[in-house]
Amino acid sequence: AWEHLIGRAKLQVHEVWYEDLTTDYEATARRVLQYMGIEKDVPAIPPPPIERQAGELNERLRRELHEYLGLPSAA
């Protein structure tokens, strides 16, 4: 739906992929700032506000689901 809206409205967008943020956060953030024309106003990129939310409970539930479905467990 977003792609349709953007296309119909002929909006200019800068696509950012989550995978790019996680693998090279600073370079991706710099590209966004450059697209916005404010890269010179931000001398240092702050650390990513992303932190891993998974924990032992998530891992246990994942293993149990894999067992229930008869799938091999990666852990």
Image (cartoon, grey):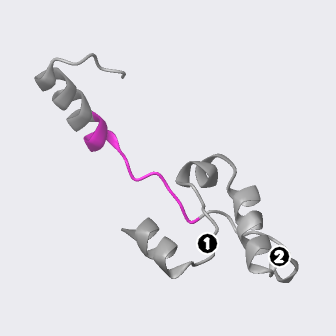
Residue 73 magenta-highlighted = no
Marks 2 and 1 sit apart, C-alpha to C-alpha, by 17 Å
Q: Nearer the viewer, residue 56 or 74?
A: 74
Dot 2: within a 10 Å radius of its alpha carbon, few (fewer than 14), some, or many (20 or more) residues? some
**Residue occupied by mark 1:** 13
Measured as percent of width and height from the top left, residue 55 is found at: 35, 44
Residue drawn at (57%, 55%) of the image: 17
Measured as percent of width and height from the top left, residue 36 is found at: 74, 79
Residue 48's quadrant in the figure? bottom right
**Residue occupied by mark 2:** 39
Q: Nearer the viewer, residue 12 or 46?
A: 12
Could you tell me which quadrant the C terminus lies in? top left
Relative to 5, residue 27 above or below: above
Dominant secondary-structure state across the stretch colored magenta: loop
Q: Which mark is residue 27?
A: none
Could you tell me which quadrant the N terminus lies in? bottom left
Relative to 59, residue 37 above or below: below
- Looking at the rendered structure, the kind of residue marked 1 is Val
The earlier-in-sequence mark between 2 and 1 is 1
Residue 54 magenta-highlighted = yes
Measured as percent of width and height from the top left, residue 26 is found at: 74, 59
Relative to 39, residue 59 above or below: above
Which contiguous range is marked in magenta? 49-59
- Looking at the rendered structure, the kind of residue marked 2 is Glu
- Farthest left residue? 68
